[in-house]
């Protein structure tokens, strides 16, 4: 199903959920301007102190000194609010300052709504340290992991060297321990944080990178429900040319450093494990394991740690081993340390820990919109530090439980209950809910959870608080629709998910004959009421493209239900008929025209006849253009026309860019629009723009596996193959049997030079790959393993299935096989038969062997995909 782009981009016929799979060879060339990001990176929102107190001197170890030192520690010429750096990023405010530089919040002038954290290194950085950092940046492998802060690029702006990073909302563990929890957390609340940090650290160690400065200030709990490890700036490859190049005095924090690090020895992963154990100890009881003593001083004093009340005997033994003063006695891997600490299942590996942590990690927030009303008291922990004699026992005061504090102005609309007693009316209650989601997405200050995630709880007996925590939203809108005689009553209520209190409710009674006519008006009224409660009456831009014809609206909702539930050729025909009936009843119903375009695109996807494909796309284009003519500000119509039709049906790059940008300008908070924008930018090789948009879409729709599949595509196009392998597991956590996760895993293994691993995936009968995908994968894997006859047989099978519509894939296969002439012939056939199947031309790593050929360059210029 991947072998023509018309099919590859349309596996899900819904306009909001295009499926982004191109042929198995779909990667983008490396970004020439980006430097490896393993540079000192202080987290947004973090104010870490200048950590180098005199050894053994009692000092406050968190928070209190940070802001004052941030003001006084640097001679850097600071950027002012409103300054522009890199001719693109506008400074909004200072987020914090660390030993290496100042972190700013900045908006992207080229992409509306995009914000980044930018760390500007200090001008007084020693030249030799700067040289070492640059060398390390070039040679340290990029670490990209769900639990490691994303660092996009390292750039130069005149005399300034700055790091572009993701902007994190939340709080550092350092701050949480001081401000939120006082002194220590219960183990049940601490464990998700420990798992996340362990997952990040283990991933780094697997890539031969040592953090060397793990401490609470470098652990960050985000509002998206995930804990991240920060500041790999002093991380160094444990093997290789940097082995003997030591960082300066800022390379470690003595309170969390092992004896070997304090003695100036080369960093080892067991040194990170010691630091990690110090952090774990502090999370659980609020104190460092040896008080104000460094590891060297504690070893000299023969200090030991007393068992913590929160830990069992075996867990304490695991913690004590990780805190051993000598490397040889210390725990050898993060995975072993986590197994020893695990509360129940000691056999869990690092990967399940990542998945579990991503579901139950503690959510915290920066904003002051919501306040914590419920706090639970915790058990008291006692810490016994033995530094020679006498023994000193310190009682730790009780601390409140983990706080659920979602992003400000965040809301989810649950599917309204159908209380009519007539199951055939389900489409109507669902349609009302979806209309409300669409209306609220236009409110610029609202973060609205997308439909797929909100509807994932339909029919499940869960309370509002549980749902809100899973979706990480502060407000829930729910309602019901009930028919009584000739009257229909719609009831809606808004609930504060933190405390469970109802904020607002309203009932609407309508005559049954008029109810369909008034649905859009009711949706607008509900949205306006919510705005008044949440945003102080800010005027919203309401949904356009509706109708006042009740029968037309009814057919429209029926068609949308079919699109969402019956994704096959029969479903496309039935949905098309419903939309055409809606248009017959109201020719000016713009939304119906846009959805008609979606159904026609779906029919193009299911067609194997090139002439039919072209005809369906031509009709779809007319329908989308008609929708825009009727409602110029209807964002869905713009994204359908640009991303789904002009690009994938006609390879009209300029036209697609115009429509996609218009949709982004209209509704930047729509997950569907962000998804289309990410796909478009990804195909053009604009990796960072694409990945940032795709991750924002996932935050808005976290329960939607489709967007996570699309992230796999964007990562693959950006040639981040190892990240694909990790992200594929996130997809499978939502949907165990997912062909896209297996598809992109096989793709990545091939790109990484692991054909055996790709073959295991593609040859397994339990792998849910489609037939054409399987043949293509096997052809490539067999050839890479020297099994030429088997590879040729698989490719011939594929040709029998797809005919000339698979020409782009055959070209990629022959390019990998070293037959440039055959590869170029098949690409010429693809241009003649199905130009959209060549959209992956710029981002296809399999075409690298022929990329310098004049015929290839000419083809790229004709398609306007290559400069």
Image (spheres, rainbow, N blue to C red):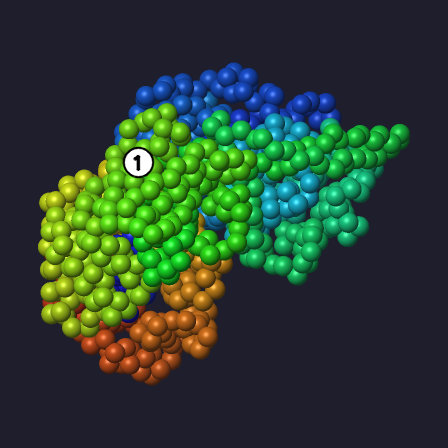
- Asked which quadrant contains residue 546, the reply is top left
Residue 265 on image: x %, y %? 65, 41
Which residue is at 67% across, 29% downward?
Answer: 182
- Please say if 162 is above or below 595: above
148 or 462, nearer to the observer? 462
Q: Where residue 533 appears, x then y in whole percent?
A: 40, 29
Residue 50: % across, % down: 57, 25
Judged left or right of residue 821, residue 346 is right
Residue at 10% across / 55% down in the picture? 622
Determine the residue positioned at 25% across, 70% down.
570
181 left or right of 747? right
Residue 765 horizontal side relative to residue 380, left or right? left
The image shows a total of numbered marks equal to 1
| Viewer-proximal residue among 252 and 492 | 492
Q: Can residue 678 be seen in this view?
A: no
Quadrant including the N terminus? bottom left
Give the residue drawn at x 11%, y 65%: 615
Q: Is 751 above or below relative to 801?
A: above
User: What kind of element bears circle 1?
Assistant: helix
- How far from the left and from the top, in percent, is residue 684? 24, 50
Outermost residue on the front side: it is 485
Q: Which residue lies furthest to the right in this view?
A: 390
- Give residue 525's quadrant in the image: top left
Residue 501 is at least partly visible in this image: yes
Task: Determine which residue is flagged by label 1.
Answer: 525
Q: Compare residues 88 and 455 and report the one nearer the observer.
A: 455
Q: Relative to 340, is 829 above or below? A: below
Instruction: Tell me if mark 1 has few (under 14), some (14-19) or many (20+) residues whose alpha carbon lies within 10 angstroms of its own.
Output: some
């Amino acid at each position: 199903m991947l072998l023509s782009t018309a099919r590859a981009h349309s596996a899900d016929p819904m306009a909001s959920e295009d499926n982004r799979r191109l042929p198995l060879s779909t990667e983008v060339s490396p970004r020439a301007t980006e430097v490896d990001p393993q540079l000192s990176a202080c987290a947004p929102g973090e104010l870490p102190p200048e950590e180098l107190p005199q050894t053994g001197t009692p000092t406050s170890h968190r928070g209190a000194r940070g802001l004052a030192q941030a003001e006084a520690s640097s001679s850097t010429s600071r950027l002012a609010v409103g300054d522009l750096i890199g001719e693109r990023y506008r400074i909004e405010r200072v987020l914090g300052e660390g030993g290496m530089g100042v972190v700013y919040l900045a908006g992207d002038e080229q992409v509306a709504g995009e914000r980044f954290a930018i760390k500007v290194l200090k001008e007084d950085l020693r030249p030799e340290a700067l040289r070492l950092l640059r060398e390390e940046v070039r040679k340290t492998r990029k670490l990209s992991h769900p639990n490691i802060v994303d660092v996009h690029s390292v750039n130069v702006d005149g005399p300034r060297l700055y790091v572009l990073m993701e902007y994190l909302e939340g709080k550092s563990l350092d701050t949480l321990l001081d401000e939120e929890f006082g002194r220590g957390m219960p183990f049940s609340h601490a464990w998700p944080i420990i798992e996340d940090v362990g997952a990040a650290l283990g991933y780094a160690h697997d890539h031969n990178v040592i953090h060397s400065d793990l401490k609470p200030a470098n652990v960050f709990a985000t509002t998206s429900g995930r804990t991240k490890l920060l500041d790999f700036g002093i991380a160094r490859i444990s093997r290789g040319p940097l082995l003997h190049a030591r960082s300066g005095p800022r390379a470690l924090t003595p309170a969390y450093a092992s004896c070997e690090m304090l003695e100036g020895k080369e960093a080892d992963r067991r040194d990170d494990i010691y630091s990690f154990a110090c952090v774990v100890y502090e999370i659980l009881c609020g104190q460092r394991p040896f008080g104000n003593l460094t590891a060297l001083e504690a070893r000299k004093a023969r200090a030991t740690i007393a068992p913590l009340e929160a830990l069992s005997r075996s867990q304490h033994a695991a913690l004590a081993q990780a805190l051993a003063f000598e490397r040889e006695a210390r725990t050898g891997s993060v995975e072993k340390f986590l197994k020893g600490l695990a509360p129940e299942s000691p056999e869990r590996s690092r990967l399940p820990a990542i998945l579990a942590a991503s579901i139950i990690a503690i959510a915290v927030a920066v904003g002051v919109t919501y306040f914590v009303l419920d706090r639970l008291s915790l058990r008291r922990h006692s810490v016994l530090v033995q530094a020679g004699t006498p023994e000193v026992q310190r009682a730790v005061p009780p601390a409140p439980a983990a706080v659920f504090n979602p992003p400000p102005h965040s809301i989810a609309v649950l599917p309204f209950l159908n209380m009519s007693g007539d199951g055939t009316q389900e489409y109507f209650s669902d349609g009302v809910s979806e209309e409300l989601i669409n209306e609220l997405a236009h409110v610029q200050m609202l973060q609205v959870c997308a439909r797929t995630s909100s509807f994932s709880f339909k029919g499940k007996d869960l309370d509002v608080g549980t749902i809100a925590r899973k979706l990480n939203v502060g407000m829930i809108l729910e309602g019901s629709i009930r028919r009584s005689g000739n009257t229909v009553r719609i009831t809606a209520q808004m609930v504060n998910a933190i405390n469970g209190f109802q904020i607002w409710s309203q009932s609407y009674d309508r005559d049954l004959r008029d109810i369909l006519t008034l649905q859009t008006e009711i949706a607008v009224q509900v949205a306006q009421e919510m705005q008044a409660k949440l945003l102080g009456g800010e005027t919203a831009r309401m949904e356009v493209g509706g109708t006042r014809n009740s029968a037309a609206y009814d057919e429209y909702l029926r068609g949308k239900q079919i699109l969402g539930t019956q994704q096959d050729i029969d479903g496309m025909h039935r949905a098309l008929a419903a939309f055409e009936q809606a248009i017959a009843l109201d020719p000016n119903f713009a939304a119906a025209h846009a959805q008609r375009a979606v159904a026609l695109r779906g029919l193009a996807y299911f067609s194997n006849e090139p002439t039919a494909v072209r005809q369906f796309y031509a009709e779809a284009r007319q329908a989308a253009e008609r929708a825009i003519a009727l409602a110029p500000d209807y964002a869905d119509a713009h994204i359908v026309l640009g991303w789904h039709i002009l690009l994938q049906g006609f390879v009209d790059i300029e036209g697609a860019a115009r429509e996609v940008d218009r949709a982004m300008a209209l509704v930047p908070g729509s997950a569907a629009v962000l998804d289309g924008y990410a796909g478009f930018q990804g195909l053009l090789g604009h990796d960072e723009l694409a990945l940032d948009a795709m991750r924002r879409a996932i935050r808005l729709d976290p329960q939607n596996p489709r967007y996570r599949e699309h992230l796999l595509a964007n990562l693959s196009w950006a040639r981040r193959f190892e990240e694909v392998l990790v992200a594929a597991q996130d997809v499978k956590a939502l949907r165990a049997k997912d062909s896209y996760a297996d598809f992109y895993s096989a793709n990545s293994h091939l790109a990484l030079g692991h054909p055996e691993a790709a073959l295991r995936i593609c040859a397994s009968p339990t792998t849910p790959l489609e037939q054409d995908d399987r043949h293509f994968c096997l052809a490539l894997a067999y050839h890479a393993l020297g099994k030429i006859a088997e590879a040729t047989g698989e490719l011939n099978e594929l040709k029998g299935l797809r005919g000339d519509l698979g020409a782009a894939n055959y070209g990629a296969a022959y390019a990998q096989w070293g037959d440039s002439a055959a590869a170029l012939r098949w690409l010429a056939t693809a241009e003649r038969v199905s130009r959209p199947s060549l959209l992956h031309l710029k981002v296809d790593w399999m075409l690298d062997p022929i990329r310098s050929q004049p015929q290839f360059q000419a083809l790229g210029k004709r398609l306007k995909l290559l400069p």
